[in-house]
Image (cartoon, rainbow, N blue to C red):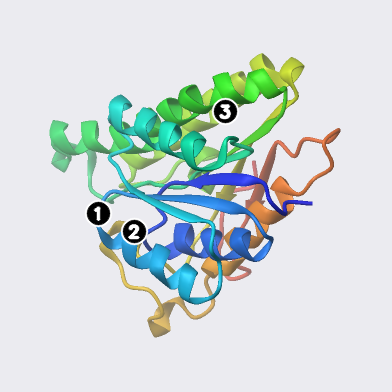
Amino acid sequence: MLKDQVAIITGASRGIGKEIAFQLAGQGMKLTVVGSSDEVYASAEELKQKGFTNILAVQADISKEADVQNVVAKTMEAYGDIDLLVNNAGIGFFKLTEEVTFDEWQKVFEVNVHGVFLGAKAVLPHMKERKSGTILTISSDVGRYTIANGSAYTATKYAVQGFSGSLAQEVREYGIRVGTINPGMVDTYFAGGSQGVPEKEDWLKVEDIAKAVVYMASAPKHMVIDEIVLHPLIQQYPIA
C-alpha cells in the first residue's frame, strides 16, 4: 500500500527516526531523511547500502522555517509528491523547574512544538492540492499525564497533542489524516542516554515505534487512527 509513496522523516540520523526510515524504505517508499547534523548523510548511505535507492538526505534545523521549506522544496523537486510527513525529531531533559534555564525551555519548544508546526504548515499546501496525505507525530505518553522533573518536555507534548487534534479537524475535508504515536519508555538516545544498555532491556525498542508508524500510514484511506499509545509491560503509568 505504501510502495512508491513519498515520506519525509525528521530526526532520522539515529534512534527512532532512523528505524522509521528503514521500515518505510522496506515498504517501498521514497524517502527524504532529515537531521540536524551531518550524521543524516551516514544514515542515508546505510539505507542505500541495503539496496534502497530512492533516498534523499537533507541537513536542516526544523525549528527554522526557511530550513523546513527547503526540505519540502527539495522533496518536491526529487519526487514530485509528498504522501507522508513523520515529525519525529525531538529533544528533552529532566530537571527541577527552578533549575531549567529560559534558553533550555525555549529550545525544547522550538524543536518539539515549532518544528511540528512548521513541518505540517510546509506540506499542507501540497497535500491539500492532492486531497490526500498523512501527518504523523512521534509524541509521548507524557502528552496525556504529567511527571515530576519534566515540566518543559511534558508541556511540549501537551502542546503537540492539542495542535494535532485541532489540525486533524481542519484538514479532514481534504482527505488528510493527522495522528500521534505516544510511546512510554523507549530504548534510545533520548535525554543524552545510551541505546542498548542492560537497564533498558525490557523497554520498548525503536522497531516497535517504527512498526506503529507503518501501521498508521498503511490504514485504508477512509480510516484515520487518531493516536496510538504504547508502553513496555514493565512501565507503571497513570490510567487516563
Q: Which residue is mark 2?
A: 40
Instruction: Compare marks 1 and 3 and give the one earlier in the sequence.
Output: 1
Residue 26, picture quadrant: bottom right
User: Could you tell me if residue 162 is visible in this image?
Assistant: no
Front-most of 235 and 58? 58
Mark 3 vs mark 2, foreground winner is: 2
Say what amino acid the circle numbered 2 marks. Val
Q: Is residue 165 above or below residue 240?
A: above
203 and 138: which is toward the camera: 138
Q: Position of residue 52 (x, y in %)?
A: 55, 67
Instruction: Sort mark 1 into few (<14), some (14-19) or many (20+) by Cα contacts within 10 Å.
Output: few
- Few, some or many residues within 10 Å of mark 2 (<14, 14–19, 20+): many
Whether the residues at callouts 1 and 3 have beta carbons within 8 Å, the answer is no
| Residue at x 28% of width, y 49% of height | 36
The residue beneath circle 1 is 37
Position in image of residue 20 (x %, y %): 54, 59
Q: Amino acid at mark 1?
A: Ser
Please give the label number shown on residue 156: none
Q: Residue at x 84, y 42 (%)?
A: 220
Q: Amino acid at mark 3?
A: Ser
Which circle's residue, 3 or 2, is located before the other in the chain?
A: 2
Q: Residue 99's spot in the image, x, y percent? A: 14, 42
Instruction: Using the numbered discs, state the Cα–Cα distance from disc 3 to disc 2 in whole angstroms.
Output: 26 Å
Give the residue at x 22% y 31%: 106
Q: Nearer the viewer, residue 174 or 195?
A: 174
Q: Mark 2 and mark 1 in contact? Answer it, CB < 8 Å.
A: yes
**178 versus 48 height, above or below:** above
Any mark on residue 164, and which? Answer: 3
| Location of residue 218 in the rendering, given as x and y in whole percent from the top left corner | 76, 49
* Residue occupying image coordinates x 79% and y 51%: 1
Image quadrant containing the C terminus: top right
| Element marked by disc 3 | helix
